[in-house]
Image (cartoon, helix red, strand yellow):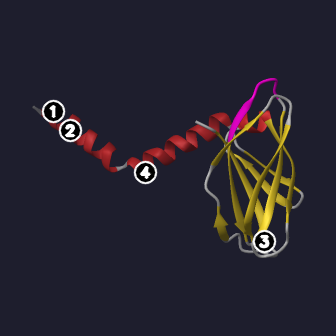
Amino acid sequence: MKNIIFVTAIGALLFASCTPLKRAKTGVTRAIAGSETTNVGGHEVYCSEGEVCAEIDVLAVSVEDRDGGRVRVTLKNRTDNTALIQIRLQIKNPTTGEVFSETRPENVAIPATQEKIYEMPGVFKKGAVVRVLLNTAY
């Protein structure tokens, strides 16, 4: 009887603490796989997993410096296989780090050893910086 109560209590505890467990799992994954932040043309590129950074290069980030401007990210696949990545953009205040806007994650396929331009119109804010977030696509 004591074992059943103990197992039930542990199960309830794990169910109630889903967010802390997910954060711990994410932290362990990043510690193992590694994450990387680089600077490209005054904008930030963040790879959540080392595998993405090893396979994909961000060659350039260009913007139309106006409210509602277009953002273009030039990506290059360094592998001999088609790469499928997930990309998301954050438009941030360069001094405070406040996020003005963020796009939805999109899956992008890049052919083997090819370059591809990811383009998102209407998201830039004058004087801001772009943070490109790259993840593996599932």
Is 116 within the magenta? Answer: no
- Give the residue pinned by disc 1: 4
CA–CA distance between discs 2 and 3? Answer: 50 Å
- Give the residue pinned by disc 3: 128
4 relative to 15 in the view: left or right:
left
CA–CA distance between discs 4 and 2? Answer: 19 Å
105 relative to 20 in the view: left or right:
right
Q: Amino acid at mark 2?
A: Thr
Percent position (x, y) of residue 76? Answer: 84, 39
- Give the residue pinned by disc 2: 8
- Is residue 121 positioned above or below 23 on the image? below
Which quarter of the picture shows residue 3? top left
- Residue at the (86%, 30%) spot, across then down: 113
- Residue at the (70%, 69%) spot, across then down: 97
CA–CA distance between discs 1 and 3? Answer: 56 Å
Q: Find numbered disc 3 in the image and state the secondary structure of the residue it sits on.
A: loop
In front: label 4 or label 2: 4
- Is residue 26 positioned above or below 101 on the image? above
Instruction: Give yes or no for contact between labels 1 and 2 (Cβ–Cβ under 8 Å).
Output: yes
